[in-house]
Amino acid sequence: MVQTEDIRVFLRDKTTPHHIAVEDRLTYLAPVSTLSGYVLHLVIMRDFYQSLIVSNRDPDIDISWSVTRTKILDSISTDLEKMNGENTGKYRRSTPAILSLENDEAWGARYVVIGSSLGAHLLRKTVIASLGPDIPADYLGYMTNNPDSGWKCFVETLRSQTLDAQSTVNGAIKTFDHLAEIIERHRGEHDTISS
Ligand code: HEM
């Protein structure tokens, strides 16, 4: 078992290039400062959460994860429904292969999902500044505000686990790469005319 001083720092160091790859792709292909880019961002994230299955030895953690995942997906659906007038149907309904991770790798996947709330905080500010305060932003708000999915609380729980550091990193990298692949599937769908 690979042990490390601080699993969170280890994860960040080992996955930074994968985070940057996802961030760059999203910023370029689905910029949230435009309406069509923002809608595409939500469509991509919906595909991502729908196709990500994680499971753990501890049933309590599994239940809390499945509640978080359902709430995230509901908040994305609410945003997309409220913006129905923006012709969300024009985006391909992509059916990516399921990424299924277990145990230590599943902790890596959770790190990626809960860590994305740090980016969501910035994205929400951009969405509101660019598209106005009435723009539906339940998903970005949920990621930013919800104590259950809170980053600090998650990092504390992560640190309290006995994990193989390398397996956890592998799970995080697989999760980032899975998202990168989903973004690629939607390449070319951002329609600047409607923004
Ligand atoms: C354009 C989109 C994104 C931007 C601008 C962005 C920005 C950021 C920023 C600024 C941080 C660091 C915050 C801090 O240290 O206080 C961060 C952390 C993080 N983001 Fe993103 N992000 C984006 C998308 C994503 C996505 C889509 C994911 C995963 C699904 C993700 C996963 C993470 C993770 C795991 C961390 C925590 C790194 C750590 O351990 O400190 N990000 N992001």
Image: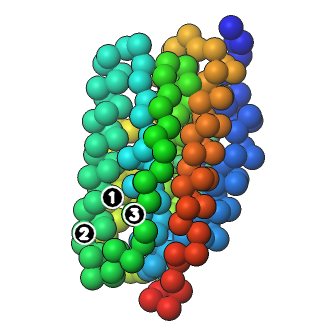
- C-alpha gap between disc 3 and disc 2: 15 Å
* In contact (CB < 8 Å): disc 2 and disc 1: no
Mark before the other along the chain sequence, 2 or 1: 1
* In contact (CB < 8 Å): disc 3 and disc 2: no
Q: Position of residue 110 (x, y in %)?
A: 49, 33
- C-alpha gap between disc 2 and disc 1: 9 Å
Q: Position of residue 46 (x, y in %)?
A: 39, 55
Q: Is residue 191 above or below residue 146?
A: below
Q: Position of residue 83 (x, y in %)?
A: 29, 75
The structure residue drawn at horizontal position 56% and vertical position 50%, both measured from the top left corner, is: 179
Amino acid type shown at disc 1: Ile
Q: Is residue 66 above or below residue 164?
A: below
- Indicate left or right for 7 with 84 as reference: right
Q: Which residue is mark 3?
A: 93
Amino acid type shown at disc 3: Arg
Q: Which residue is mark 2?
A: 81
Q: Which residue is mark 1?
A: 76
